[in-house]
C-alpha cells in the first residue's frame, strides 16, 4: 500500500475536477480545506507529507452562499474555492445549445456502445427542443441514453424520447412579452422572437437588467442573444 497514490498526488502538476462539491460531507470539507491551505498530501502508509501542485476545478448546482448561511458548507472553504467563479446558465436559458450537445452526447454514447453509430431524427430534435430541461445537461444526456436503448436500429425517433418526471414544455405562444419567457422552436429564435427582444430593449432604453427581467431570462443570455442577432441600439438624431 505504500506505493499507492491518492487522488491529489496522482494529479500532481495537473487538474482535479470536483463535481457536486455541495454534496461533500463536513469531514471531507475539512480535509479539502487543509489541502488547499498547505498544498500537501500524506501518502498512504507514510509519516511524511509531500508537496503537490494541483489545480482545483469545483462544480455545483446549488448556491453555496445559501449553504454557508445555513451552516451546511464551510465559509472558509467557500472562499478558498471561489477564486474565479464561472456561472453557467441553465440549459433552459440557452436552448440553442441543445442540438450541439445532442450531437456531442450521441458521439459519446456511440463510443460507449462499441462504436454503434447513432442518429436522431428531426422530429426527435424538435421534441428535445420543446422540453424545458429542469434537470439541465445531465437530463439531456440521460434522455439520449434512454433513447439509444429504446430505438430500433441506429436512429432515435420522437417516440424514443421519454422524459422522466413528465414532459415539461414551453408555452405554445408568447402572450405577454413582459411576463412570459422566450419560446424556443426549431433550435433557433424565430423572427418574431428576435423582434420581441429588440422591442423589449428599446422600450427599456437598452437597460439589460430590466429587459432580461421582463423577458424572464438572465443577463448573460440576453447579451448572447444580442450578439448572435447583431442587435444594435439606434441613436436618435444620429
Image (spheres, rainbow, N blue to C red):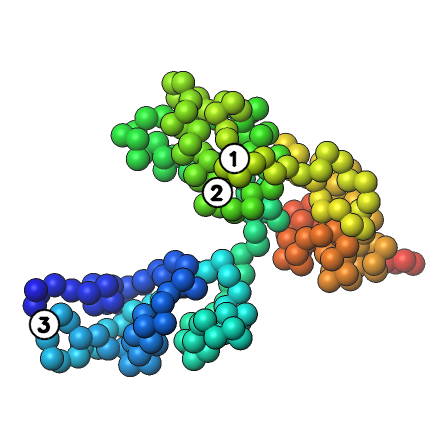
* Pick the front one: 124 or 99: 124
Q: CA distance from mark 2 to mark 3?
A: 41 Å
Residue at mark 1:
163
Residue count near mark 2 (Cα–Cα under 10 Å), binned few <14, some 14–19, many ≥20: some
Q: Which tag, 2 or 3, sits closer to the chain's start?
A: 3
Residue at mark 2:
139
In front: mark 2 or mark 1?
1
Q: CA distance from mark 2 to mark 1?
A: 8 Å
* Quadrant assignment, res 13: bottom left
**Residue 57 placed where, x, y %?**
39, 64
State the count of labels: 3
Q: Residue furthest top?
A: 152
Identity of the residue drawn at 43% across and 76% down: 74
Q: Which tag, 2 or 1, sits closer to the chain's start?
A: 2
In front: mark 1 or mark 3?
1
Query: Residue 204, labelled with which disc?
Result: none
The reply to whether residue 129 is visible in this rendering is: no
Q: Could you say whether the residue bearing mark 2 is in a helix, strand or loop?
A: helix
Q: Could you say whether the residue bearing mark 3 is in a helix, strand or loop?
A: loop
Marks 2,1: beta carbons within 8 A: yes
Q: Is residue 87 left or right of residue 80?
A: right
The quarter of the image holding the N terminus is bottom left
Compared to residue 112, the image places residue 159 above or below, namely: above
**Residue 104 placed where, x, y %?**
43, 39
The quarter of the image holding the C terminus is bottom right
Identity of the residue drawn at 39% across and 58% down: 19
Amino acid at each position: 500500500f505504500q506505493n499507492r497514490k491518492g487522488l491529489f498526488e496522482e494529479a500532481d502538476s495537473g487538474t482535479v475536477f470536483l463535481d457536486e462539491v455541495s454534496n461533500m460531507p463536513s469531514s471531507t470539507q475539512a480535509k479539502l480545506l487543509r489541502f488547499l491551505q498547505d498544498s500537501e498530501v500524506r501518502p498512504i502508509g507514510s509519516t511524511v507529507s509531500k508537496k503537490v501542485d494541483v489545480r482545483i476545478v469545483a462544480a455545483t448546482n446549488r448556491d453555496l452562499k445559501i449553504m454557508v448561511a445555513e451552516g451546511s458548507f464551510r465559509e472558509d472553504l467557500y472562499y478558498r474555492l471561489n477564486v474565479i467563479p464561472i456561472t453557467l446558465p441553465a440549459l433552459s436559458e440557452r436552448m440553442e445549445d441543445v442540438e450541439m450537445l445532442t450531437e456531442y452526447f450521441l458521439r459519446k454514447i456511440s463510443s460507449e456502445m462499441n462504436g454503434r453509430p447513432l442518429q436522431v431524427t428531426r422530429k426527435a430534435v424538435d421534441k428535445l427542443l420543446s422540453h424545458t430541461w429542469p434537470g439541465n445537461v445531465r437530463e439531456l444526456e440521460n434522455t439520449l441514453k434512454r433513447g439509444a436503448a429504446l430505438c430500433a436500429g441506429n436512429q432515435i425517433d420522437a417516440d424514443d424520447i421519454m422524459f422522466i418526471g413528465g414532459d415539461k414544455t414551453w408555452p405554445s405562444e408568447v402572450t405577454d412579452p413582459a411576463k412570459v419567457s422566450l419560446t424556443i422552436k426549431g433550435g433557433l429564435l424565430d423572427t418574431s422572437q428576435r423582434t420581441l427582444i429588440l422591442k423589449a430593449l428599446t422600450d427599456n432604453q437598452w437597460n439589460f437588467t430590466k429587459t432580461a427581467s421582463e423577458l424572464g431570462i438572465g443577463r448573460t443570455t440576453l447579451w448572447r442573444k444580442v450578439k448572435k442577432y447583431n442587435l444594435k441600439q439606434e441613436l436618435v438624431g444620429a
